[in-house]
Amino acid sequence: MERVDARRRAYEVLDKADVARGRAVRICEMALYMFMEDGDMKEARSLLRGGLMYGPAYHGTIYRGWIAMEADHAGNVDAARVLFEEWCALSGGKDGGFWCRYIAFEARHGGARRSRDVAEAAVRACPDDPAVHAKYAKLELRLGQDGRAFAVLGSALAAFASDAGAQEWLVDEVRGYYDALRKQSLTGRIRSFCRGIRRCHPPHGYKRLQSV
């Protein structure tokens, strides 16, 4: 009952702040409920497709929810990719947030080539969005391509030569991610090393020597 009340209050807040987003969230939740009940995406897809008909204000929320449902719950990565392409066409390809999500999606579900292709398309579509450039550089770091990552960062810094604030943000963002990956890698190596150490047993007769 407490969970139901909490959800109702959350809906009320959403409706007051953004009616379209509140309704879109409800559509996504209902679609997920239908899928969990039936184990079939057919009805859920119909509901989500109908939700898109309400207009552009609904697109971002519904596409995000639908993509996550296809990839994470239904295990249909190809269907999720089709939805990304639909979203791109509807938004005109100028939504930096969309591209950052697409890059993250391919980094998780696709290979290096596919994710890099999406990142390059993102930079072409949104050359004035520093977050897109940073996402591309961080992708290369994640792929273990430090040289490519810093080349991407260099191109981004050149693109924002007249914006010192954007340059500073880019450097901090990429360097912070680089440091985090190095720390994570070091922690993993230390754990592996510790697991490989066998406990040393004291030599025969050691306990008797201690008791003397």
Image (cartoon, rainbow, N blue to C red):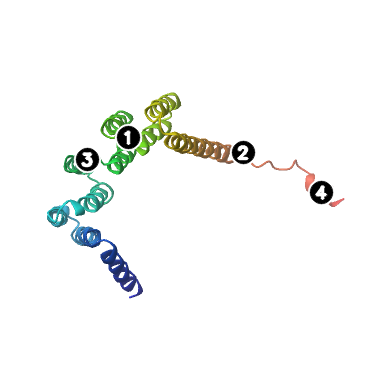
The residues bearing labels 3 and 1 have C-alpha atoms spaced at a distance of 25 Å
Instruction: Specify the amino acid type for callout 3.
Output: Arg
The residues bearing labels 4 and 3 have C-alpha atoms spaced at a distance of 69 Å
Helix, strand or loop at disc 1? loop
Q: Nearer the viewer, residue 102 or 173?
A: 173
Helix, strand or loop at disc 2? loop
Q: Position of residue 27 (x, y in %)?
A: 20, 60
Task: Please state which of the two labelled residues, at mark 2 or mark 4, is closer to the viewer.
Answer: 2
Q: Position of residue 98 (x, y in %)?
A: 27, 43
Task: Tell me which label, 2 or 1, sits earlier in the chain.
Answer: 1
Q: Position of residue 10 (x, y in %)?
A: 32, 67
Circle 1 sits on which residue? 128
Q: Nearer the viewer, residue 25 or 76?
A: 25
Circle 3 sits on which residue? 81
The circle on residue 197 is 2
Give left or right: position of 98 versus 186: left
Q: Nearer the viewer, residue 65 or 157?
A: 157
Instruction: Specify the amino acid type for callout 4.
Output: Arg
Q: Looking at the image, how many numbered discs can be counted on the residues?
A: 4
Task: Tell me which label, 4 or 3, sits earlier in the chain.
Answer: 3
C-beta proximity under 8 Å, tags 1 and 4: no
Task: Tell me which label, 3 or 2, sits earlier in the chain.
Answer: 3
Helix, strand or loop at disc 4? helix
Task: Tell me which label, 2 or 4, sits earlier in the chain.
Answer: 2
Q: Position of residue 84 (x, y in %)?
A: 22, 42
The residues bearing labels 1 and 4 have C-alpha atoms spaced at a distance of 75 Å
Circle 4 sits on which residue? 208
- Pointer 2 local density, CA inside 10 Å: few below 14, some 14–19, many at least 20: few
The residues bearing labels 2 and 1 have C-alpha atoms spaced at a distance of 51 Å
C-beta proximity under 8 Å, tags 3 and 1: no
Task: Tell me which label, 3 or 1, sits earlier in the chain.
Answer: 3
